[in-house]
Amino acid sequence: MPPSIDATLPIERELELHRRALTGYCYRMLGSGSEAEDAVQETMVRAWKAADKLEARAALKSWLYRIASNVCFDILQSSQRRAQPMDLGPSSDADAALGSPLPEHAWVQPVADARVLPETTDPAALAESRETLRLAFVAALQHLPPRQRAVLILREVLRWQASEVAELLDTSVASVNSALQRSRATLESLDLDTADTAPRAVDAEQQALLAKYVEAFEAYDIASLVTLLQEDATFSMPPLPLWLTGQQNVHDFMLGAGAHCEGSRVLATSANGGPAVGIYHPAEDGYEPWAIVVVETDGDRISGLHHFLFPPLFAEFGLPPKLDAAGVGVLAP
């Protein structure tokens, strides 16, 4: 929840207090961290230019969300639905063709926790925010028309009153309630498996599991790595459409088409409400960014490894653009 209004703050500073919450809202709307950042920046610019029209500082929050919603609606007019590989077809065997990469805008992209998670000490609020950032949930939201998507996020994620949402969207409470019912029905029809993929607070058990994964990956000890996986764990690599399920398929792929990952270095981070890593591949003079991996966990096992082969994401996560031969981050010249 954004901080309470302080009329003594300069408008620019007060706008910035809402940036993280707005980024979380726009990310759920758009399914892309970079698009969400752009949408929030456009929101801030519009708000600053029209600040003299704001009648009461207490109305700033709803005013910002109105602007952000309109920015997202404009973006969504011309964009296709973002998806995960699991939405596009059945899983494949480890020796299947990788397929041709699809453009970036085809995929739900990860987002760094530091850009969207609320600054709160309330465990329940933080757990709820993590739950609604997971990749499967954000991908499911993309099935909803934009205005239904906004209603669901505002009502169910951000806990706005129906009357507040109606005012923001210039519609009636009855229309908001109807849109919420339709959006719920759509999500229920998708039959999301929420039991095994909901992110948990990063506790000691999860940290230990991630450390074991990093150790096994850097040693390229695939036999040990797959013992960390659930039997039906999923493995994906956007922008490639191929995805796998099961320990054996992951094992065979990592020692087959994926063997070029051997010798890589890994840096830990967090994304979509849970653990993540940045993988750097060997290069002539060190290591270069290759993929951000969202690591989904269930208890003491990994339930999903989702590799996003988009090196520009490293900057969004605050990860170095390069590692030297010793594996130490190197700043760009």
Image (cartoon, rainbow, N blue to C red):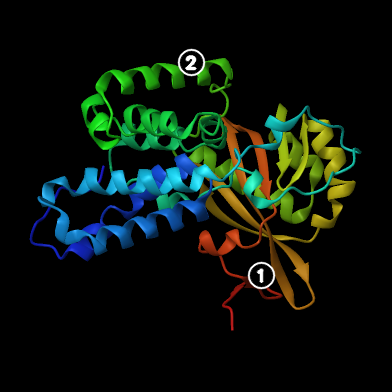
Residue 172 or residue 177, whichever sits in front: 172
Q: Is 228 displayed left or right of 151 in the figure?
A: right
Q: Measuring 87% from the left and 37% from the top, which residue is drawn there?
A: 94
29 relative position to 307: left or right: left
Residue 283 location, quadrant: bottom right
Q: Give the structural element (helix, strand or loop) at label 1.
A: loop
Query: Is residue 232 depicted above or below 39 in this figure?
Result: above
* Res 189 quadrant in image: top right
Which structural element holds mark 2? helix
Relative to 59, say whether 309 is above or below.
below
Q: Position of residue 86 (x, y in %)?
A: 70, 31
CA–CA distance in space, label 2 to label 1: 49 Å
Q: Label 1 neighbourhood size at 10 Å, few (<14), some (14-19), many (20+)? A: some
Q: Is residue 119 visible?
A: no
Identify which residue is drawn at 42% across, 28% down: 148
Q: Identify which residue, 69 or 323, lies in the foreground.
A: 69
Q: In the rendered image, is residue 147 in sight?
A: yes
Give neighbour class at mark 2: few <14, some 14-19, many 20+ (Cα, 10 Å). few
Q: Residue at x 71, y 69 (%)?
A: 287
Q: Position of residue 230 (x, y in %)?
A: 69, 28
Name the residue type under label 1: Gly
The front one of 63 and 212 is 63
Given residues 63 and 321, the one toward you in this image is: 63
> Which labelled disc corresponds to residue 327?
1
Q: Is residue 220 above or below residue 10?
A: above
The three-letter code of the residue at mark 2 reads Ala
From the top left corner, tell me how far across and down residue 161 is, in percent.
23, 27
**Quadrant (top left, top right, bottom left, bottom right) of the C terminus:** bottom right
Residue that carries the numbered disc 2 in the rendered image: 185
Q: In terms of image quadrants, where is residue 328?
A: bottom right
